[in-house]
Image (cartoon, rainbow, N blue to C red):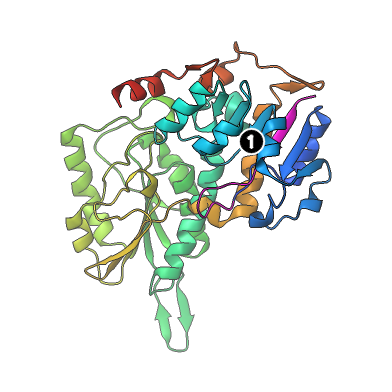
Amino acid sequence: MPVIAIPKELATAERRIAIVPEVADKLEKLGAKIQIEKGLGQSAFLEDDAFNSASVVDDAASLYQAADVVLKVQPPTLDEIKQMKPGTLLIGALAPFQHLDVVAALKEANITALSMELIPRITRAQAMDILSSQATVAGYKAVLMAADIAPVFFPMLTTAAGTIRPSKVLIIGAGVAGLQAIATARRLGAIVEGYDVRSATKEQVESLGAKFVEMPFKAEGEGGYARPLTEEEKQQQQEVLAKHVAASQIVITTAAIPGRASPKIISKDMVEAMASGAVIIDLAAEGGGNCELSQPGETVNHNNVVIHAPLNVTSQMPTHASDMYSRNLYNLLALMVKDGELNLDWDDEILQGCVLTHEGEVKNAAVAEAMQNA
């Protein structure tokens, strides 16, 4: 019977947790023994006694020593890795390209690490896709942030004092976060435009009631992501977007690429062409931001345009973000825990795709290359 342990998150301001009571119950039915650190769920408004099928352990050190499997949200600290037994299976959002020192420590400690961001984007793995589930939260929350900061209403209002026109909102990036942002802004009554370099997203944008911003080129890439643009295409993109950005009262950018810097889409000149009181919410701040003036984790005012670049937006909605993240983990674990036994089938393309370290080696080629270059 494998012991699955879930410690409290140590990262600053991280409120999500890697397991919720419902998922703990389901894992127990698969034949696993669940152990949680005391106070695990407080940040997500869950008390210890809500975890009926879990044992509560007072300290993380004891938890790690008993664990066959460790579930986390954020990457472990170097000290946490030292507390894990060799051969432990670690599963979480490990952000390997941003934490090469953690990858090196996992390799040296002989930890088998599965990085949830590396799960291949195939149909069979959709229920394990944390990028999509967490982006849903971020896209929704970004619109609420914009509505809170903006000095205008989103919907059209007809009042005794006259009619107020609806706000114009531009969403850049039509992935999961962008589409959720479009849907939320439309629910609030705004006039919404959506843009993505992948022309294939036009139908999705329009199905949500937004107008699609057309480009004179197509930029579909592999794995559902956009390919890098040529210099000529970048210039064309800037020229078209500049007009739409200037006409918008709220701009929300969501163009992030895992493991790479976020593309700079909104220039300083574009910001300076926006009306006084306009707002930019830069959801790509983790990768440096889509706006040239964004300061990750900060809110800046440039010529009376507010540029808000929040970090770890999903943690601001810990209840539902944890619920979805935990379900993603369960769907992956269901491939490995059966009849009370832990069995990793390395012929499975999902495990092949998300394995980061195993038996003292870095198994992901791109991460291994990044470590060599570093």
Q: Secondary structure at mark 1?
A: strand
Is residue 20 toward the left or the right of residue 167 in the image?
A: right
Q: Amino acid at mark 1?
A: Leu
Q: Residue at x 43, y 73 (%)?
A: 153
Magenta includes 178? Answer: no
**Magenta residues, start to end:** 1-15
Q: Give residue 305's quadrant in the image.
A: bottom left
Residue 275 at x, y percent in the picture: 25, 68
Q: Main secondary structure of the magenta part?
A: loop
Residue 328 sits above or below residue 12 on the image:
above
Residue 229 at x, y percent in the picture: 24, 33
Residue 308 at x, y percent in the picture: 36, 60
Q: How many marks?
A: 1
Specify the quadrant that holds the C terminus. Answer: top left
Q: Nearer the viewer, residue 140 or 233?
A: 140
Label 1 sits on residue = 71
Is residue 211 toward the left or the right of residue 263 in the image?
A: right
Q: Residue at x 51, y 26 (%)?
A: 106
Residue 64 sits above or below residue 124 on the image:
below
